[in-house]
Amino acid sequence: MEQLEQITNSEWKIMRVIWTLGHSTSKQITSLLSEKEDWKASTVKTLLRRLDRKGFLKIVRKGRTYVYYSKIDEQTAANDAVLNIFHNICAMHAGKALNSVIQNVPISKNDIQVLIQTLHQKAKTAPDKVPCNCLKHQDCEGRKMSYEHEE
């Protein structure tokens, strides 16, 4: 899977408006987010420029107005963001992190059934223990380990 550049929390808010509406102008985004975020038009335009530079937006000029479309669907962006988190933690902690997500994020009964099926399939080939992928000379808690200098 190609690693996409990450979307910041503020950029997620912009993208969610675009995904919800299908496309949007900066004026529409500012109007929808100004009350909740107290953002000015310049803030929205800055975030739109960043998203464009990162390759997430298609911009179409219609007269004097720019219309913004997403180049990536919401599910793909969400999947990439979640996988990025797991690529940045010790592999030995992934199971506990997943369990915490499942415990703390509302999911439907159907989603639970899909997860159960996925886990049953995954269990067939899962190792007894996932190897640590921490940096050399670090333990799985992120602490620096002492080591003897090799001659």
Image (tube, helix red, strand yellow):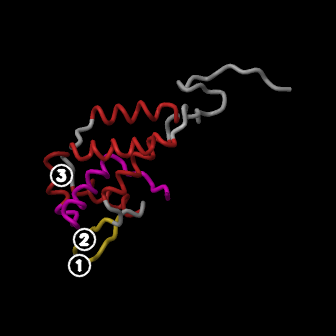
Q: Position of residue 28 (x, y in %)?
A: 16, 62
Residue type, numbered disc 1: Lys
Residue type, numbered disc 2: Val
Q: Earlier in the sequence, mark 2 or mark 1?
A: 1
The reply to whether the magenta stretch includes residue 63 is no
Give the residue displayed 20% in from the left and 46% down from the top: 37
Give the residue displayed 32% in from the left and 61% down from the top: 73
Give the residue displayed 31% in from the left and 36% down from the top: 102
Residue beneath disc 3 = 33
- Residue 66 vs 87, above or below: the answer is below
**Looking at the image, which residue sits at the far right?**
151
Gap in Å between the C-alphas at discs 3 and 2? Answer: 17 Å
**Looking at the image, which residue sits at the far bottom?**
63
The reply to whether the magenta stretch includes residue 20 is yes
User: SS class of the residue under badge 1?
Assistant: strand
The part of the image, by quadrant, that contains residue 99 is top left
Q: Position of residue 68 (x, y in %)?
A: 27, 68
Marks 2/1 in contact by CB < 8 Å: the verdict is: yes
Q: Does residue 66 appear left or right of residue 1 in this picture?
A: left
Q: Position of residue 94 (x, y in %)?
A: 46, 35
Q: Which range is magenta?
A: 1-28
Residue beneath disc 2 = 67
Task: Classify mark 1: residues with Cα within 10 Å, few (<14), some (14-19) or many (20+).
Answer: few
Q: Earlier in the sequence, mark 3 or mark 2?
A: 3
Residue beneath disc 1 = 62
- Residue 61 vs 113, above or below: the answer is below
